Amino acid sequence: MDKESLKRFFLNDSNQDERRFIIDWLLNPQNNQVIHEWMKENWNLIDSQHLIYSPDESDIQKMWLNIQQKIHSEQLDQDQRPIVDLPLPKKSILLSLYQKVNRGMVAAAMIAAIVFSVVYFWGSPSPDLQKSPNKTNVDLNDVAAPKSNNAVLTLADGTVVDIENAGNGQLASQGNMKVVKNANGEIIYKGSASDVVSYNTLSIPRGSKPIRLVLSDGSIVWLNAASSIKYPTAFIGSERKVSIKGEAYFEVAKNKQMPFLVSYNDIIVKVLGTHFNINAYEDETDVKVTLLEGAVHVTQGLSENILHPGQQAKVLTDQIKVQNIVNLDEVMSWKNDLFYFNGVDIKTIMRQVEKYYNVQVEFKDEINYQFVAKISRNVNISKFLETLEITELVHFKIENGKIIVTK
């Protein structure tokens, strides 16, 4: 991070993309030493913004109002939705921020936190927070993290194969193709193409770990929970085309003579050889295509865009919006066995929880905060909820497999 960019951020002169990038950078504890050094060098600048923490309640209130005015001078939301005026966070949250960083860094942490109404958690809570008297009220009626993918393979003739309970080795024969499950639970297609095109569908339900699929051309697909992919057992003709529902990550084998197409409803992503993620859950407001390597061509009706590495296309009805600065670690966290939320509202978080833990969620109150958290996907749901509850901004109760969300 260059010093001029940080200075522009503190003076509220950054553009939207810069702000999002800098906020993410400020919240990464690996940058603590750099932040500390910059803060010491620019203390007069920081002091002039009246952002220094004070334990006095009235000073906190003044600081909060000052920052709110600066934030609202330019909408930070990429989608241009209005920023919600938020109440002063509970004092314990400000104190926890203060405990987590030294005095020289607290202004940076506070700005980053308040810009997104973020609660600052990264990894395990600090010992001080674990001793909080406001202990979580999560019920012992717990839900364990998924242990397997529970995948189901539907063959061309309608035969259904339970992947989890099937042994390793050959699962089926599809024309000249053999469908094999290896020791790691991956599904692999081996063989040669025939003149007849037949289709298979691989599905994994809610409450599942991701599964890895190797298509007949060598392309690799990771499938997330509550997702499915339909594909030919072998690719023939002028293109390689598959269709998905839910979320999948592709590493496409290069073949200039046969482009690779991924479709979801009327959205088509066209590639020659590349790495990209597509999030196309029906309960999300848009379809997100994120490019990690190569280039992809995204089309919907008459709208189209070409993405370059690090960009994300948000596909809405008859509109494709491209975001230039994307946190790829956040996008790919599901594949890397993590929950990663970087300024995300609680409803978005709980939609992921519903799919991964196979639970229902009911909201009793409106929660107008956004959260930053990085949590292992191997923890029980009670531990996941505990981490969010420490913020004191949201509370949960588990009742017969349903998560009740309250203030």
Image (cartoon, rainbow, N blue to C red):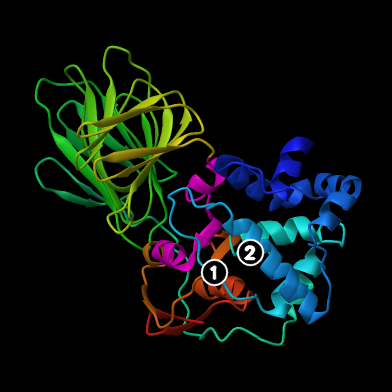
Give yes or no for contact between labels 2 and 1 (Cβ–Cβ under 8 Å).
yes
Q: Nearer the viewer, residue 59 or 36?
A: 59
Q: Report the disc number at residue 135.
A: none
Amino acid at pointer 2: Gln
x and y, in percent, of residue 184 in the image:
44, 44
Compared to residue 399, the image places residue 129 above or below, namely above
Q: Please say whether residue 86 is visible from this viewpoint.
A: yes
x and y, in percent, of residue 145 in the image:
47, 66
Please tell me how crowded label 2 is: few (under 14), some (14-19), or many (20+) other residues with Cα within 10 Å. Answer: some
Identify the image quadrant of residue 243: top left
Apparent side of residue 106 relative to residue 67 in the rendered image (left or right): right
x and y, in percent, of residue 394 in the image:
54, 77
Q: Nearer the viewer, residue 406 or 398?
A: 406
Q: CA distance from mark 2 to mark 1?
A: 8 Å
Amino acid at pointer 1: Asp
Q: Which residue is mark 2?
A: 68
The magenta segment is 326-353
Apparent side of residue 40 relative to residue 406 in the rendered image (left or right): right
Compared to residue 288, the image places residue 135 above or below, namely below
**Residue 333 painted magenta:** yes
Query: Considering only order in the chain, which callout, 1 or 2, is on the residue closer to the N terminus?
Result: 2
Q: Residue at x 79, y 65 (%)?
A: 100
Of the 4 image quadrants, the one containing the N terminus is top right
Q: Secondary structure at mark 2?
A: helix
Q: Which residue is mark 1?
A: 85
**Residue 291 painted magenta:** no
Q: Residue at x 83, y 77 (%)?
A: 55
Identify the image quadrant of residue 259: top left
Q: Nearer the viewer, residue 68 or 146?
A: 68
